[in-house]
Image (tube, grey):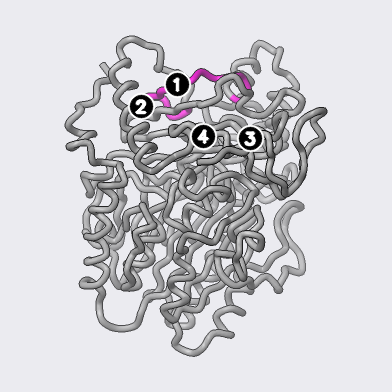
Amino acid sequence: MGKIQRRDFMQNSLLGTAAAFAGLQSIFCESANSGQTTGRRPNILFAISDDQSWPYTGAYGDRTVRTPNFDRIAREGCLFTNCFAAAPQCSPSRAAILTGRNIWQIEEAGTHNSLFPKKWPVYTDLLEAAGYETGYTGKPWSPGNWKDGGWPHNPAGHEFNELNMKQVPADGISSTDYAGNFEAFYKQKANGKPFCFWYGAHEPHLRYEAGSGLKYGKKLEDANVPSFLPDTPVVRGDILDFSFEIDWFDTHLGRIINFLEEQGELDNTLILVTSDNGMPFPHAKANMYEQGTHVPLAIRWPERIAAGRTIGDITGFIDFAPTFLEACGLDIPNTMVGRSLMGILESGRDGLIDPAREFILNGRERHSHSRFDNLGYPCRAIRTQDYLYIRNFKPERWPAGDPDGYHDIDGSPTKSLITENWQDEDIRPYFDLGCAKRPLEELYDIKNDTGCLNNLADKPEYKETKEQLWSILENCLKEQKDPRVLGYGDIYESYPRFAHMREYLGGFWEKGKYNPRYHVEP
């Protein structure tokens, strides 16, 4: 039970290593140079919500949300069922998208709300250098400090955030007129010039107006409550409010699509829609579990992509930048370890297409300032079609933050229900899932346990599976020079945080400063 055939994973010890990535990279670069169709260069529209786990769209069968525009992209393009964020948190994942590199390969940018060093090419700059107009509205690479990293503007592009809505339907929703700002961007660019635009909604990030989902017609009985949360009216109401903010993201996506259609640009635009990490509830966001990293993904580009397909290949955020560059006929720099999706997109096939895509790697470091001395909760994970293996490098720490507030979990009625009633016998199991200390290793049978409730790591019948997955993960991390496996992982604890710091007595809490106690030389 639980065995993995070594030949399926190791393939001469190359799969998942930097050497394999480099070999594939040269193939993709040749494809980008030789396979580009004639005619206008495509536009790129990248649309990303904030904190949306993968099941919560109509295209995946959820009844709570109303996402006709995501569903249209999926219907007229490709719907991916196995896309994973680089981290279960926003700014590291967004940096991975831009650079095509894993979070352990981008120094300070691999931890939350720190610096973004300007040493790796980002796809937006490469497209701008090739004649593209670049811009963003809403949330770009954020939160963090790009100015001190050496950037002239946010790495996502030039800012277009001047237009605001006169009113919004619920408290907590951003007043930014995302679609209006996109139109302003489009109208100011030179006629006929291709564009690369980042639409980053602030929704459905907490906080929510309590009862907004019910107010706008959603029903408690339709709420999709994951197995790691208690099924109560409080939680169901929270999920309805969460779902309503997903609707808002989708509404602006629809306005942008309609504008592109009016301009005759829609079919010449590669549209990619996703989210930066999972839903903002205990055991999801800021956790390596399924609902923390598994995100929605749909891609439409009718000039090159056959419609109506569902793709099961495992894909990740580091694949987006190479995809955009290849689609636009540009070389992919060797700094990018991700692999272009163009071969899958242009295959015309459904299901599992690329046999090399057997797993994805991701991880996390510090999230909020939630532990004494500004310490993080370092993890790395490998996800296959069947299993999720997690390595918790500091199991002695509290995964959700120190018990004074469990600040790595965003505040919500659901969080309050779980953390304030942890002694209740009906609530305690959910509290333990979200807040209790965790072992060094975790292993989950994803096909039978999507909620990641049953850790199989200590079961004898899964010993071989666990060891194989850790061997692959460790080898990949060593090849990619992850400090966590090379003996100087404390460097992550030294990285500055450019946001609120809590005054833990005797600990380090200097905003924007490196923690000298953990400074190490690579």
**Sequence-first disc among 4 and 2:** 2
Please say if the residues under marks 2 and 1 sit with CB atoms less than 8 Å apart.
yes
Mark 4 or 3 closer to N-term?
4
Q: Gap in Å between the C-alphas at discs 2 and 1?
A: 9 Å
Instruction: Identify the amino acid type marked 4.
Output: Tyr
Q: Residue at x 36, y 61 (%)?
A: 322
Q: Are marks 1 and 3 in contact (CB under 8 Å)?
A: no
* Comparing labels 4 and 2, the label whose residue is closer to the camera: 4
Judge depth for marks 1 and 3 and give the one in front. 3
- Left or right: 327 with respect to 432? left
Tag 1 secondary structure = strand
Q: Which residue is disc 4 drawn over?
A: 488
What residue sits 43% from the left and 65% below the top?
A: 271
Q: Is residue 328 left or right of residue 112?
A: left
| Magenta span of residues | 434-451
Q: Which mark is residue 470?
A: 2
Q: CA distance from mark 4 to mark 3?
A: 10 Å
Observer-side mark, 2 or 3, equals 3
Of 8 and 303, nearer the camera is 8
Q: Where is mark 1, residue-wise? A: 441
Provide the secondary structure element on which disc 4 rests: loop
Question: x, y (%) of residue 83?
Answer: 40, 46
Please identify the quarter of the rendering in which residue 339 is found: bottom left
How many neighbours does mark 2 have within 10 angstroms: few (below 14), some (14-19), or many (20 or more)? some
Q: Position of residue 512 (x, y in %)?
A: 72, 49
The correct choice, above or below, for 296 with respect to 398 in the image is below
Whole-Å distance between the Cαs marked 1 and 3? 25 Å
503 falls in the magenta region: no
